[in-house]
Amino acid sequence: QSVLAQPPSTSGTPGQRVTISCSGSSSNIGSKAVNWYQQLPGAAPKLLMYNNNERPSGVPDRFSGSKSGTSASLAISGLQSEDEADYHCAAWDDSLNGWVFGGGTKLTVL
Amino acid sequence: EVQLVQSGAEVKKSGESLKISCTGSGYNFFGHWIAWVRQRPGEGLEWIGITYPDDSQTRYSPSFQGRVTISADKSINTAYLQWSGLQASDTAMYYCARLLGDCARLGCSFGAHWFDPWGQGTQVTVSP
């Protein structure tokens, strides 16, 4: 069971906006930055969002991140077929003294 | 281009030893922590541990402490993950990733770092 809680799956149609939640506690999300990773089918994870809401170079501005208290969210607007992937949230945990991940959310574009 | 290239897939039997590698290029390898992450079939990501190639410091997740050994050889820009007695439950994809941060702006604590880039992964299959 993962320390950070994510919904196992979500879906949307092209052009739609979807959000993926990531819930933690005061020892991780509540006090540390959240990062998001996109894992396309059969591929390695790739950095999608860091420091809660900063996009690496090359990531479209359709992707946005936010954090409030002990929860974080990833939003994808103007959904495209190539966005179909698994999305993982992660943060450092002061109690466990290490990084913790969510279980991942599988996004299906209908 | 910053890149991490991992060694190829492995098929082993329970009880055997194994060492997989991760070779970095395109950046100052010995000046960045390297992390190892496990992904079992159909499951999420799990942090195993990290190593700092310049002085071989290591840190482990309590879940993996004593079960694996992480090391690095900065002379050949390579980090390693090894097992001395594999179990069927070790069957998984293993990824390495560079720790990246912006110390000047965000501070240098581990909590202010993220994993980028990732290696392509090494599939480890252990039969009972």
Image (cartoon, grey):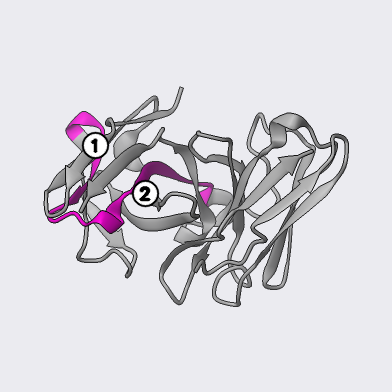
Q: Quadrant of residue B54?
A: top left
Task: Name the amino acid, label 2.
Answer: Ala
Assess whether residue B88 is covered by the magenta stretch: yes
Q: Quick check: A108 above or below B51?
A: above
Query: Disc 2 on helix, strand or loop?
Result: strand
Mark 1, residue position: B10
Assess whether residue B95 is covered by the magenta stretch: yes
**Residue toward you, A109 or A77:** A109
Tell me the quadrant of the picture where the C terminus of chain A can be found. top right
Q: Residue at x 50, y 34 (%)?
A: A43
Residue A48 is situated, as x and y percent measured from the top left of the image, at 63, 42
Mark 2, residue position: B35
The mark closer to the camera, 2 or 1, is 1
Residue A65 is situated, as x and y percent measured from the top left of the image, at 73, 52
Q: Residue at x 29, y 43 (%)?
A: B124
Query: Disc 1 on helix, strand or loop?
Result: strand
User: For the residue carrying disc 1, how many other residues have a C-alpha within 10 Å: few (<14), some (14-19), or many (20+)?
Assistant: some
Q: Quick check: A38 above or below B37?
A: above
Going by the picture, which residue comes out furthest to the top? B1
